[in-house]
Image (tube, helix red, strand yellow):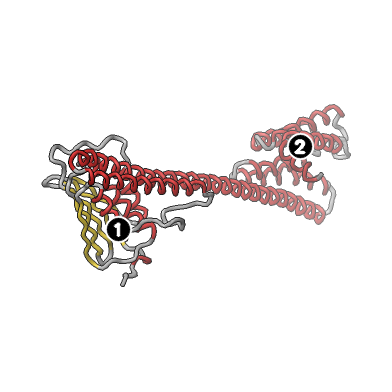
Amino acid sequence: MVERYVEWCRRNPVVVDAVLAVLVALIGIALARSAYSPRVQWDQSTVVAVVAAAPIVLRRRFPLPSAIVTAVIAAVALSVIGVRGLELPVLIMGYSVVVYGPRWAGPLMAGVMLFGGVLPFAVRGGGAGAPAGVLVFMVVVSVLVALCVWLAGALRRARRRSVEQLRERARLLEEGRRQEVRLELLAERARISREVHDVVAHSLSGIIAQADGGQYAATRDPGRAVDVLAGIATTGREALNDVRGLLDMLRDTAPVDDTADGGPQPGADDVPALVEQVRAGGLPVTFGTSGTPATLTTGAGLAVYRVVQEALTNVVKHAGPSTPARVGMDWGRDELTVEIRDDGASGPRPTPPRGGHGLVGMRERAALHGGSVETGPNTGGGFTVRMRLPYARTDRTVRT
């Protein structure tokens, strides 16, 4: 019940301040009609008390203007009309300025509360013929009251600022979390796009190249045509299995990446088999290696395999299935260098279609593991793809 009431008050601050203004006005009327102002008429004290309490309704939204109005009303009422007992609205508005107003206005309002509110009360309380000790006591008490009101406002202001900072920090954390989720989703989409592109593009390019070769072999060597058809069937089955694996990965609710454990992923050890498969499809490609092989992580090995796969696919697509090509792997001391070079088509090299993602996917895969991919035409014709992949700490174990 109390929590609901507090929450309602937070949602309706103007109503709360209006009720407070009514109470302050009633108290001001009673004080104005007290012994401190016996010659003031009832209507004058009533009007002054109501007018002095009215700015309290706007103390949160316009704290400084409302406080100035209240101070002016209190000063005029005391000096011109002789109405007293307006210390309470002065103290309330001073507190409100310290809490809700600008920082520089806090010390100013402390002075206003001291000299415009509590000191006149102290002087009246001491009386003209009162002993000096009583007057000093009333002044000290009045100063302490003003100081306590100012300190209460300062503490309230600090608490409000702390709550606002916590809310802003929570908002920023929530926004950061949303951005992280969005970036993770984008990264996952890019990874899946690379996988689908590598699997489908390579498989379809191999099937097309083998089918073209099978058409030629069917008229010259029917036995060779049978082998080509068998290769097409094998490539199609492998592509279907890869696509099924991707679909299984998409059905999994756990986050995955290139280094996630799952089905067996191809790696650098599978590059010779990949080259042999492409050679069986009709592309005259050779393979060579140098240096001492090192054990790569699953993600790095998959990146090497996919780059070689995409580069050979591009040779078939853009240079032709009869273009000689070479794949070389140099296991250096600090990094692995993979180079895929072709001699180029007999005619002009076809322009790659717009919107392709092959070269972009190569660079993205290498960048995920701290590497880079350089591509460009050769001086004497053809095209070269060169991948540099630094060894990670877990890649430095040399196989024996």
Can residue 27 be seen at all in this image of the molecule?
A: yes
Q: Residue furthest bottom?
A: 400
Residue at the image position 38 percent from the left and 66 percent from the top: 394
Of residues 177 and 15, which is closer to you in this image?
177
| Amino acid type at mark 2 | Val
Q: Please say if 279 is above or below 37.
A: below
Residue at the image position 36 percent from the left and 66 percent from the top: 393
Residue at the image position 17 percent from the left and 39 percent from the top: 349
The crowding category of the residue bearing disc 2, from other C-alpha atoms within 10 Å (few below 14, some 14 to 19, many at least 20), is some
Q: Nearer the viewer, mark 1 or mark 2?
A: 1
Q: Quadrant of the C terminus?
A: bottom left
Of residues 176 and 242, which is closer to you in this image?
242
**Residue 187 appears left or right of 103:** left
**The quarter of the displayed image where residue 186 is located:** top left
The circle drawn on residue 389 is 1
Counting from the top left corner in percent of width and height, residue 161 is at 61, 48
| Amino acid type at mark 1 | Leu
For the residues labelled 1 and 2, the Cα–Cα distance comes to 68 Å
The crowding category of the residue bearing disc 1, from other C-alpha atoms within 10 Å (few below 14, some 14 to 19, many at least 20), is many
Counting from the top left corner in percent of width and height, residue 80 is at 76, 31
Q: Please say if 322 is above or below 355.
A: below
Determine whether the residue tagged by mark 1 lies in a helix, strand or loop: strand
- The answer to which of marks 1 and 2 sits earlier in the sequence is 2
